[in-house]
Image (tube, rainbow, N blue to C red):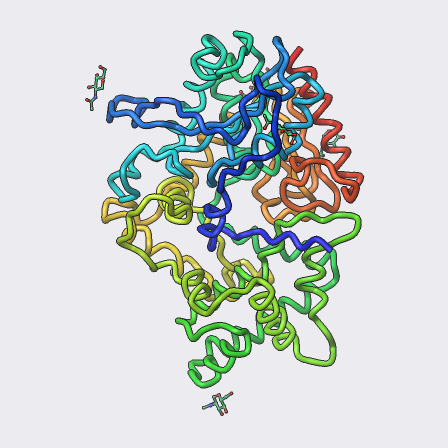
Amino acid sequence: MRLALTIPFLAITAMAKCAVIDGGSQPPATVPPSSTAYWFDQPIDHFGLNNGTWQQQYMFNATFYKPGGPIYILTPGEAAIGTYYTDKTYFTNLAEQTDGLVVAVEHRFYGQSNPMPDLSGPSLKYHTIENTLEDFAAFIRIAKSDPDNVFPVAVSPNSKVVFGGVSYAASISAWMRATYPNIVDGAWASSPLIQYRYENYWLDQSWGKHLAALGCAIEMAQAVNELDEVMFSGNQTAIDDIQARFGSPQLASRDFAALISAIITINAKAGVSTDFEPTQYTVCDFFDSSRSNLDSYALAVSTLIDWLGLSQQALTQMADTTLGLDNYALGQVARVWYYQSCAWYGDWQVAAPASTGLPVYRSRLVDLEYYTPNCKNKFGNHMLDRVDSEGFHNKWFSILQNVSKIYYTAGSLDLWRASSATPREGTLLPNTTLSPTYLIDGATHAQDISAPSEYDLDSVQQARDIGNALVRQWIL
Ligand SMILES: *[C@@H]1O[C@H](CO)[C@@H](O)[C@H](O)[C@H]1NC(C)=O
Ligand SMILES: *[C@@H]1O[C@H](CO)[C@@H](O)[C@H](O)[C@H]1NC(C)=O
Ligand SMILES: *[C@@H]1O[C@H](CO)[C@@H](O)[C@H](O)[C@H]1NC(C)=O
Ligand SMILES: *[C@@H]1O[C@H](CO)[C@@H](O)[C@H](O)[C@H]1NC(C)=O
Ligand SMILES: *[C@@H]1O[C@H](CO)[C@@H](O)[C@H](O)[C@H]1NC(C)=O
């Protein structure tokens, strides 16, 4: 039994702590271990607003590299780099098959790649997508023109470069190929977010589709309706009683509603394999006709809290988006990610408003009012009342039109499917042989990028085979 517990964005801080660099197995003496951290000088702002410099962290695995081989560049996006990215993804398998070098480069403002001494609103002014892409481009230009400058092993100049990533980092991969086609020869975008909306209630709808595939969507929607009857009743005794039954500390109603939806979906990103369905095991298996749907929901959440060993204090922290409004310390993944929502694209993960007529799988208390007041409170009054999600989407979706050599994937049960290149039947971008989209039947988020396993769904292996063949064309 492999219970892969992933961390939702609400509680993403926990993830940063996992990025401890470990030694790994002993490579040949001439190849430095992939756990060694290297640093690359970057300007704070590539467009002249601040000429100070900072150091961007990267790591690489040269075990399989042979002169003339390609460079596979990955970024984790909103997480710290570590040997997982150099050694443990499918890109390492690709490197082994194609004599390639795997390089993991950290994204500005995440991990230890800090352009500024803190995460205040004024410091985060330099956290733009344009700067982020230009950071990676600056690294690639040197890696191609003067590899000795960035690698202590002999790497051929003018190597082919394939960019890869999952989720938000998959969007970055696609944008890198679209923005810098002369230095990025191809991009593998696994479950990219390419449709950005102000209110992302489609994430909740995609989760409902996953539950429907397992046969418990109606029960879950009913449980949420029963819950909301209490939460909106104004009867504080009943509300307190419900919170206790879910194993939650007593919280403000919105915080409680957001907390339990974060916990119940905690495994929705975990991979489905031939021997294990995490959402079946942690959600649907709890619905039982001997009790009310609300009681089943409460039991599922309280059991997960137990399995995860989450203390009441940890739960309070997970729930409270106003926590640490004035804490500008480095190393807060959730704060930087929050800034992206406030300043770039919105994409707030809310329940569908009643006006849409859609079912909901999270409480209607999880609405814009839960998230958006924090933008000014965390980052300052200069933040917009309403971020221009449409403007962001139009710009970054348009640049993907007519771009060749991007491979888009998404799982049919992907939590982010509605934001992906294949949001429903068919595709959002033209599905051409130059930049194909592949829907991975029965899979969740970004399963194609993990290293192959004997428990993989056939569709996941198929997605890798298609990508493998494309990469070989790109690096010719
Ligand atoms: C940064 O350097 C450029 C080029 O020398 C210059 O035009 C610009 O004014 C400088 N910016 C700042 C904020 O000093
Ligand atoms: C590169 O990754 C492979 C596969 O995980 C691993 O066996 C090897 O030790 C790594 N190389 C280095 C230099 O750490
Ligand atoms: C409030 O809820 C409690 C517990 O469910 C219940 O006993 C009580 O009758 C309710 N009060 C009102 C005014 O409905
Ligand atoms: C894409 O290319 C086709 C064929 O060259 C052209 O007709 C179309 O206008 C292009 N679309 C965009 C958005 O550039
Ligand atoms: C894209 O086109 C290919 C080739 O025709 C097809 O196999 C694939 O299923 C299409 N993808 C989607 C998501 O429709």
Residue drawn at the location 24% of the way across and 48% of the way down: 380
Which percent across, then down, holds residue 151? Answer: 48, 16
Count of numbered circles on the image:
0
Which percent across, then down, holds residue 262? Answer: 52, 59
Which percent across, then down, holds residue 119? Answer: 30, 43
**Between 10 and 18, which is closer to the camera in this rendering?**
18
Is 298 rendered above or below residue 384? Answer: below
Q: Which quadrant holds the N terminus?
A: bottom right
**Between 335 and 41, which is closer to the camera in this rendering?**
41
Residue drawn at the location 58% of the way across and 46% of the way down: 416
Is 186 rendered above or below residue 211? Answer: above
Can residue 62 be seen in the rendering of this structure?
A: yes
Is 42 rendered above or below residue 235? Answer: above
Q: Quadrant of residue 279?
A: bottom right
Report ligand 2 position as a quadrant: top right
Q: Quadrant of residue 250?
A: bottom left
Residue 108 falls left or right of residue 469? left
Q: Quadrant of residue 71?
A: top right
